[in-house]
Image (cartoon, rainbow, N blue to C red):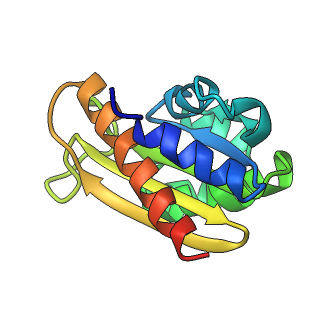
């Protein structure tokens, strides 16, 4: 059986002697959990914060209410701010943050439908991110987001 993209990503992070931390909204800690299942988890994973509700982005991470009001809790602007705030809470080399719309009832619009996911990574201070629209059930959107995040990290780490 082929190794998962998260497994490959975790190996690369370990080979470089780096650590990783997460602040997740839409994926609610699933991404961090996937890294916990890798052989290198003890070397690379620092931890994560599940901040599904916008109030936790404000209270735990210190994201300004004004930023959320202006851009919505599910936006690249908020996802980026979460990464910079996470860096001050969990000492790590890589900070990965996720927001998005896995189900109806958030800030979806015709331009930002359900399935829209935002991922932002700070890799030793360098920025990497994506905004993608996935389709399928909530679980399928989360799985696709995890795969795409692993691809983003592998690509960004190969440039270091």
Q: Relative to 60, does residue 121 appear above or below in the rendering?
A: below
- For the image shown, how many numbered marks are present on the structure? 0
Residue that appears at 57% across and 49% down: 97
Q: Residue furthest front?
A: 1
Residue that appears at 27% across and 26% down: 138
Q: Relative to 35, does residue 160 appear above or below in the rendering?
A: below
Which sits in the foreground, 111 or 26? Answer: 26
> Which image quarter is the C terminus in?
bottom right
Residue 23, x across and y down, in percent: 63, 42
Which sits in the foreground, 123 or 81? Answer: 123
In the picture, measured across the screen, residue 119 lies left or right of residue 122, that is left
Specify the quadrant of the image occupied by residue 155. bottom left
Specify the quadrant of the image occupied by residue 147. top left
Residue 67, x across and y down, in percent: 57, 61
Q: Is residue 63 visible?
A: no
Residue 143, x across and y down, in percent: 33, 32
Which sits in the foreground, 97 or 18? Answer: 18
Which sits in the foreground, 34 or 97? Answer: 34
Specify the quadrant of the image occupied by residue 15. bottom right
Q: Is residue 39 visible?
A: yes
> Which image quarter is the N terminus in?
top left
Q: Relative to 71, does residue 55 appear above or below in the rendering?
A: above
Residue that appears at 56% across and 28% down: 29
Residue 127, x across and y down, in percent: 58, 72
């Amino acid at each position: 059986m082929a190794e998962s993209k998260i497994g490959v990503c975790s190996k690369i992070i370990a080979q470089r002697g780096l650590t990783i931390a997460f602040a997740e909204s839409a994926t609610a800690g699933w991404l961090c959990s996937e890294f916990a299942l890798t052989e290198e988890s003890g070397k690379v994973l620092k931890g994560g914060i599940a901040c599904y509700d916008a109030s936790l982005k404000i209270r735990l991470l210190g994201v300004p209410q004004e930023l959320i009001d202006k851009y919505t809790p599910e936006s690249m602007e908020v996802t980026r701010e979460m990464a910079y705030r996470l860096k001050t809470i969990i000492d790590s080399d890589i900070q990965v943050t996720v927001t998005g719309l896995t189900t109806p009832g958030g800030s979806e619009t015709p331009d930002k439908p359900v399935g829209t996911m935002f991922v932002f990574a700070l890799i030793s201070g360098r920025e990497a991110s994506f905004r993608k629209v996935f389709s399928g059930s909530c679980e399928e959107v989360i799985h696709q987001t995890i795969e795409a995040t692993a691809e983003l990290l592998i690509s960004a780490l190969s440039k270091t």
